Amino acid sequence: MTTGTTSGSARPQDARRQLITEHVLARGTSTVAELSELTKVSVMTVHRDLDELARRGVLRRFRGGVSALPSTVFESNLDYRLGVNVAEKEAIARAACALVEPGMSVMLDDSTTALALARLLVDQQPLTVVTNARRVVDVFAGRDGIRLIALGGEYSHTHDSFLGVPCVEAVDALSVDMVLVSTSAMDARMTYHQEQDVVLVKRAMLASGTRKVLLMDRTKLARTALHRLAPVGDFDHLVVDAGIGGELLGELRERTDVRVADTV
């Protein structure tokens, strides 16, 4: 058992916690001793990591170890999503950014891929940005040349965004040039999400846009979830990373314009 931090082998905190999360999700449960050996840090450090991951709602603590929460819980958690497939999301954001022209009005959802895109769009001035995501609001707030419209509603700590009937009604009052969204799952024909409140907001967003863009990394492909969101063919563009399989790519291209983003 590792009792102290091993010099040169300890991972940075965020990367270590991501490793712990992926290890537990793959196995269902794990012990503190096992995670200490895996990460090459002390048991005390692992305990602190697990306390934080439990606080975020990613994992569940029990005496001597930790277990995975149901996938519908941790996959919705923003803190978890922020640490997953970062390079792929940034590549997708770069490709999607090319679709946006100065002077447009765009609506961004509360996905982490849309957040990555927001950081690139600050230079596409002038621009009108509509969003229900608090962190996207933070990106654009106070920026010259940006008209920012924040969608209200019931605050969701899990998503760090605003949802519910007030949000849907706010979206319904608007019409934008382009809506850019992501979701948790899709197959060759349909997109899905595991949460009803999220689906209702995303559907309203899609109905408000002249052009609709779907942003999806490969981990969300060839999967389904409880609620149907919209057919793939309803989107004008689909932006995916280069990890997509060839057969699925061919099927998707029969239904919409697909742009494959290379990870640098």
Image (cartoon, rainbow, N blue to C red):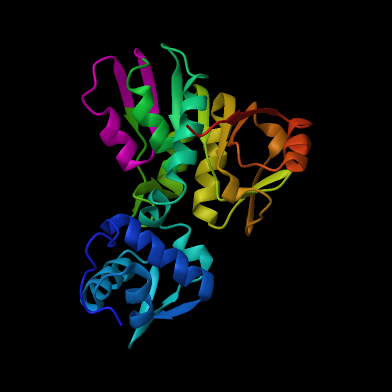
Where is 57 relative to 32, above or below? above
Quarter of the figure with residue 32: bottom left
Q: Nearer the viewer, residue 69 or 226?
A: 69
Tally the marks.
0
* 181 left or right of 63 in image: right
Instruction: State the residue at coordinates (50%, 19%).
Output: 98
Q: Which residues are magenta?
A: 125-148
Q: Residue furthest bottom?
A: 63
* 74 left or right of 44 in image: right
- Image coords of residue 72 (percent x, y): 52, 64
Q: Nearer the viewer, residue 224 or 128?
A: 224
* 246 left or right of 150 in image: right
- Image coords of residue 135 (percent x, y): 31, 40
- Image coords of residue 73 (percent x, y): 47, 65
* 194 left or right of 117 in image: right
Instruction: State the residue at coordinates (65%, 26%).
Output: 236
Residue 173 in view (yes/no): no
- Image coords of residue 203 (percent x, y): 57, 40
Quarter of the figure with residue 166: top left
Q: Nearer the viewer, residue 37 or 15?
A: 37
Q: Quadrant of the N terminus?
A: bottom left
Does the segment drawn in magenta span residue 126? yes
Where is 145 relative to 21, above or below? above
Where is 87 relative to 4, above or below? above
Q: Nearer the viewer, residue 154 or 142?
A: 142
Instruction: State the residue at coordinates (46%, 68%).
Output: 23
Instruction: State the residue at coordinates (51%, 34%).
Output: 263
Residue 90 in view (yes/no): yes
